[in-house]
Image (cartoon, rainbow, N blue to C red):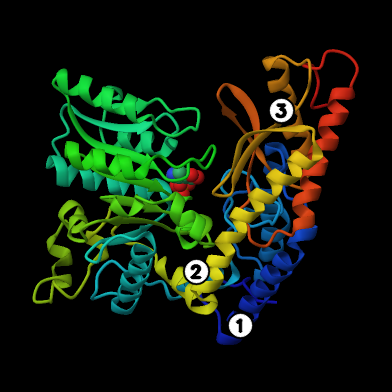
Amino acid sequence: MTDSSKTNPKLEFDAESMRRMGYSVVDMIVEHLSALPAKPASSFASREELEAKLREPPPADGSPFEAVLEQVRDDVLANAMWANHPRHFAWVPGPSNFVGAMGDAIASAYNISPTSWLEASGPSQVELVVVDWLRAWCGLPEGAGGIFVSGGSMANLTAIATARRVKLADDARGAVVYCSEQVHSSVVRNLRVLGFTPGQIHEVAVGEDLRISLSALREALRVDRENGLRPFCVIATAGTTNAGAVDPLPALSELCRAEDLWFHVDGAYGAAAVLTESGKRLLRGMERADSLAVDPHKWLFQPFEIGCCLVRDGRWLAETFSERPEYLQDTWVGRDAEQEINFGEHGVQLTRGFRALKLWMTVKVFGERSLRAAVQRGIDNAEAMEAYLLELGCFEIITPAQLGVLTFRYRAPGYDLDESNALTRAIYDANRRRGFSMLTTTIIRDMQVLRICAINPRVEDAQLRRSLEILAEIGEALCAQPGDPRLERSS
Ligand SMILES: Cc1ncc(COP(=O)(O)O)c(C=O)c1O
């Protein structure tokens, strides 16, 4: 046991103790990951239970590492959904991978901040290289650049701040941003945080296919210009969170060019599909973006947190974010500004984690070919699930499998919309409590629907099928209940 009973003002252990602690952590992780498919896909405890387990004042004296680790495993980590569980189909899963997790462990232990070249030349070079891999995959030209941030939300925020700087010299009075009604909520929040008022955020209608209506967008631009407003940016989504829909990127890029508008693409989860042939076709036009959000902690299998903001001209980031206080002058004075990238001047964060490492190590260890196959597997999973649902015969597909996402609902003849919506929610709830798979609901065209995002490459076909059979069994049992079908479905 590691002895922490005495005061340890250096907060350190000898090499042998560190080794033992490290090995026990690795053992715990490997045990967890190996057993994952056999575990429930969702686990959760009430606030009351967790208060009882975890509430305490900061302990004055230390405890053995092993005892703390046990509590972490049993009281903390056991009460959570694991986004890398093979049957976690909820929201956008984080399938992650072990190499990426080890990369994070190294980045954390070495505690390097790629803020400036002076501090972190090697890590900064790795970030340059990995950003450039993403740039090339997404088809942006050489000379484009980017930065790793915490996730898709921050990637979108970084992009919009850059757009405002480059296009409007930061004067956003009367400026309007256009996106579809299906835009991710992070975009709306970011615009608000950046000071845009509701009147400056134009959410344009979508068609039946849930893609932005070009005619409605053109009309909105015309009317806003007539009213003296200043349209300045269109935000397209390449893979909507609800349905995996891709806005008409080629047409939008043309429109943006013709109307002198910034073209941002939120490809937070969908852009990774560019690694596959069908994804590349679907995402055509993404390469014309002025800025692009990509989220490696989603479909590029990285542990949370890593998102990437790519911009068409690598110089735009420094133009937008650089601040040079005197206490940091050694990071640029007398240094080669052309050659030495200071990522701390390229985004909102100064001190920042070495996020690029996990993605770099993942690509190096598995290779691009395996990564492509893993992304393809997510597309195939959703298509296979759509086919199983049709085979089962008791489900209606609401939006077909696209970019790994699928929405559907249980067919309940004679149910009106309210009843059918209640049934969907009841099926979701019963399935969550059953725990074999975890999926979520959303609303498509006023309908409550079940939604699956199947991008984990480690799920077996038999598990996909069983997950859907269970939904069918739940649906059947709920519909067979006597009495009002809208009441107490989840009991
Ligand atoms: C299309 C899209 N944009 C942005 C985000 C936000 O990403 P994050 O949760 O990493 O901040 C998501 C998350 O699912 C998303 O699907």
Q: Where in the figure is residue 315, as x and y percent of width and height? A: 17, 60
Q: What residue is pinned by disc 3?
A: 424
Residue type of the residue flagged with mark 2? Asp
Image: 48 above or below 283: above
Q: Residues within 10 Å of mark 1 (few under 14, many from 20)?
A: few
Q: Position of residue 139 (x, y in %)?
A: 34, 61
Left or right relative to 155: residue 300: right
Distance CA(mark 2)–CA(mark 1): 18 Å
Classify the position of the C terminus by image quarter.
top right
Determine whether label 3 and label 2 are within 8 Å by CB: no
Quadrant of the image for the N terminus? bottom right
Disc 1 and disc 3: Cα gap in Å? 50 Å
Q: Amino acid at mark 1?
A: Arg
> Which residue carries the number 2 mark?
104
Residue placed most toward the observer, 330 or 68: 330
**How far from the left and from the top, in percent, is residue 2?**
65, 76
Q: Quadrant of residue 351?
A: bottom left
> Which type of secondary structure does the marked residue at label 2 adopt?
helix
Q: Position of residue 360 (x, y in %)?
A: 44, 73
Of badges 1 and 3, the one in the foreground is: 3
* Mark 3, secondary structure of its residue: helix
Q: Badge 3: how crowded within 10 Å, few (<14), some, or many (20+)?
A: many
Pointer 3 or 2: first along the chain: 2
Q: Residue at x 85, y 36 (%)?
A: 473
- From mark 3 to mark 2, how far is it between C-alphas? 39 Å
Q: Residue under label 1, please give it.
A: 19
Amino acid type at image mark 3: Thr
